[in-house]
């Protein structure tokens, strides 16, 4: 086999991998778009991000679907790369994410009109539940309802 044939074969394999990744991202984007996930969300939209006012920005980029949660100027934001999404029912979606490029998590998010809330957060590698039934395991507090900001309308 010639060097040229090997190079062409390699390029075809790389191109197929890129196309498969893009094809996998499209259904995920569509599921989240129909769920109404994209946009800016906060506990209180008219106040700056803080530990008591989580702010989430969910969007699509050329690299795929991401969302960022900010707890204020004194903390680093959490960046979630969305790997897949599955709609459980009209008001609930499970999103597999990679948190800060490291930890895979399955987040179960519930929507109630213009609000969303994390109901479950399971670390994929260990199976540990960080959030169960809307309660954070480490401090027993309820996860907050986040409201859609900036007058954005939810997708149906």
Image (spheres, rainbow, N blue to C red):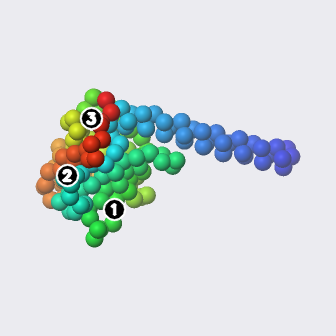
Residue 146 locus on image (x, y percent): 22, 47
Nearer the observer, disc 2 or disc 3?
A: 2
State the image coordinates of residue 13 (x, y, percent, origin top left).
68, 42
Secondary structure beneath dot 1 equals: loop
Characterize the local packing of mark 3: few (<14), some (14-19) or many (20 or more) Cα atoms within 10 angstroms. some
Q: Is residue 3 above or below residue 50?
A: above
Alpha-carbon span between mark 2 and mark 3: 19 Å
Within 10 Å of disc 1 (Cα), the crowding (few <14, some 14-19, many 20+) is: some
- Residue 144, x across and y down, in percent: 18, 50
Point out the image quarter for the N terminus: top right
Left or right: where 31 falls relative to 133:
right
From where the camera sits, is residue 10 visible? yes
Q: Dots 2 and 3: beta carbons under 8 Å?
A: no
Among numbered discs 2 and 3, the one appearing first in the sequence: 2
Left or right: 121 in relation to 60? left
What residue occupies the far right of the structure in this picture?
Answer: 2
Q: Is mark 3 on a helix, strand or loop?
A: strand
Front tag of 3 and 1: 1
* Residue annotated with mark 1: 77
Q: Please report contact status of discs 3 and 1: CB closer than 8 Å, yes or no.
A: no
Closest to the observer: 58 or 121? 58
Residue identified by numbered label 3? 92
Report the quarter where the C terminus lies.
top left
Could you tell me which secondary element the residue under label 2 belongs to?
loop
Q: Which residue is drawn at 25% across and 60% down?
A: 49
Q: Which residue lies furthest to the bottom in this view?
A: 74
Any mark on residue 43, and which? 2
Asked whether disc 1 touches disc 2, contact meaning CB atoms under 8 Å apart, the reply is no
């Amino acid at each position: 086999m010639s060097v040229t044939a090997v190079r062409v074969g390699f390029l075809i394999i790389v191109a197929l991998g890129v196309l498969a990744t893009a094809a996998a991202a499209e259904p995920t984007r569509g599921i989240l778009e129909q769920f109404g996930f994209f946009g800016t969300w906060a506990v209180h939209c008219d106040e700056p991000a803080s530990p008591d006012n989580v702010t989430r920005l969910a969007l699509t980029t050329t690299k795929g679907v991401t969302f960022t949660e900010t707890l204020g100027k004194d903390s680093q934001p959490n960046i979630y790369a969305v790997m897949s999404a599955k709609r459980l029912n009209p008001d609930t979606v499970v999103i597999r994410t990679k948190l800060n490029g490291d930890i895979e998590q399955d987040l179960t998010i519930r929507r109630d009109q213009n609000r969303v809330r994390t109901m479950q957060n399971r670390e994929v590698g260990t199976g540990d539940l960080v959030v169960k039934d809307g309660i954070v395991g480490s401090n027993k507090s309820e996860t907050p309802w986040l409201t859609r900001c900036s007058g954005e309308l939810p997708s149906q």
